[in-house]
Amino acid sequence: MLDVLMTTLLAGMMFLLVYWYYSNAFSYWSKRGVHTPKPLPFFGNLKDSMLWRKNFAHAMTDMYLQAEGLPFLGFYRSATPFLMLRDLDLIKHVMVKDFQFFGDRGITVDEKRNPIGAHLFSLGGSPWRKLRVKLTPTFTAGKMRMMSGLVRECCEEMVSWLQDSAAKEEDIEVKEVVAKFTTDVIGSCAFGLQMNSMRDPDSQFRKMGKKMFTPTLRNTLVRAAGSLAPILLKIFPFRLADREVSDFFMKLVGEIVSYREENGITRNDFMQLMIDLKKNNSAAGEDNASNHESSNHVTENNHKLDDSYEITNSRIAAQCLVFFVAGFETSSTALSCCLYELASNPDVQERLAREVASVLGRHGGSITYDALQEMKYMDQVVDETLRRYPPGGTLLRRCTRPYTLPGTSLHLDKGSLVIIPVHGLHHDPEYFPDPLRFDPERFSEENAKRVPQFAYLPFGEGPRICIGLRFGRMQVKACLAALLSRYQFFTCAKTSTPLKFDPRVPLVTTPTEVWLTIKKRPAVKVAGL
């Protein structure tokens, strides 16, 4: 009887302690006069997201739309307070004007415990600034033009591999097809390797790509623990990246670097730039990058950039890993969503196919970098796809020193976390009427001028805008041009309408299956474009 009583008392005390903890934590925004939806213990305002009922970006959109008229609102992920910005001018301040206060993404990086995690996306402060400047020369228009031939070879392999399916008018799972394509592109352009993912079911690169984005119980539990008690991720050396994936990239990069250095081999790819930086810190390249960054406002309180951020094999592996992740997963998601919308909107598909035929006809049928730049309706289609399905549905920034939001009395402490709800902005009817409708005309030359600045952020904005923007657009456009010049796509009985999104992963990714019917395209008439 005494044991039962003691157990009941202890349970009651634990309940009161937890209740007190959350009650105290949930007063953070109310003390500052910030509107906050009513939070729940353990979950805060993200119950559906934390229980894997809804994708995080979609949960943010729900909150964003419900706060119509407010410049910002507070919310909680478990007990951790976040500030969501709704006002475009405030977003501009955080991302550009006052970037010196918000240069970090709010990601804790322990390079000693997890060297593969110290990449450009996660780094902040001085290491990020120095590395960003060093890497910028890889993504100029000139480098994209040189890499376009490698991308074209991958396109030809993909089109050839699809011939039998198109001849039989089969239903195909396009997400896997384009994922293999983007894997091959990254393998060629970043690592100088032929992956052959299309024809090799045992491709190691494709295996690693699947492993990184297939939710596991372990990774899901680690993310949940980090949400409930972020301090756990600082105390214990949890790895979100699978050890097999980390070891694979560390070993691969070490072998490639050693082979090229020992044999004097050079190549126009991402890996070669990293090897050159490792050798001499590429002083000349840094000067060029500094000029380029200045033209894009990539400065932070006039910090002097130097060569003290040493490039090592582990740091090369970290950058190659994020290049692989960003280049393969986000582009394959954009491509599969775009093909789904083209199949669902045949008039758009046919207009785009006519443009592709017309432009390629002027370039001898070759998908060159210059030919892709001429495809203006293609740009509209890609822009609208990224509006409907932005791979990075939210942008996170951490306040690096005390800051007062302009025009308000709200003071943010150092360490405050700020969310820019990209998916919410892209689906705000104030900026994009009838937001669920796929309409490339939103981005015609005339209409695009009416889209308010900072309402459309598929690649971010400001100094931390996606460094691989040009490369991502090039491989997406090249893939679409190759496919639509030869094939047509239609929805089928297996097609999920509308598309569903996996709530267990942080990106706005589609499920593993996006089924469409593929057929050979009859000769395209280009008159009347």
Image (spheres, rainbow, N blue to C red):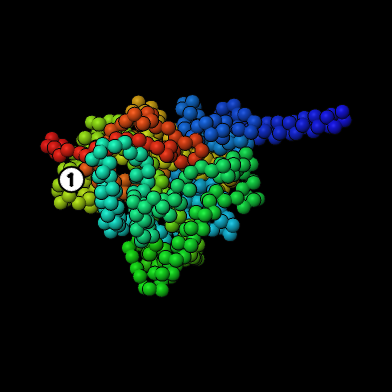
Image quarter hosting the N terminus: top right
The front one of 150 and 305 is 150
Residue drawn at 28 percent across, 33 percent down:
490
Query: Quick check: 49 above or below 192?
Result: above
Residue drawn at 60 percent across, 50 percent down:
238
Helix, strand or loop for disc 1: helix
User: Percent position (x, y) of residue 408?
Assistant: 52, 35
Image quarter hosting the C terminus: top left
**So how many labels did they put on this image?**
1
Residue 295 appears in the figure: no
User: Percent position (x, y) of residue 230?
Assistant: 62, 44
Query: Quick check: 33 above or below 185?
Result: above
Q: Is residue 227 left or right of residue 186?
A: right
Q: Residue furthest left?
A: 527
**Mark 1 Cα shell of 10 Å, populated few (<14), some (14-19), many (≥20):** many
Residue drawn at 15 percent across, 51 percent down:
364
What residue type is disc 1 on?
Answer: Val
The front one of 468 and 290 is 468
Rendering quarter of residue 257: bottom left
Q: Is residue 360 left or right of residue 141?
A: left
Query: Quick check: 478 above or below 503?
Result: below
Residue drawn at 48 percent across, 62 percent down:
251
Label 1: which residue? 359
Q: Residue furthest right?
A: 2
User: Percent position (x, y) of residue 234?
Assistant: 63, 50
Residue 161 appears in the figure: yes
Q: Is residue 369 left or right of residue 458?
A: left
User: Percent position (x, y) of residue 267?
Assistant: 33, 65
Rendering quarter of residue 520: top left
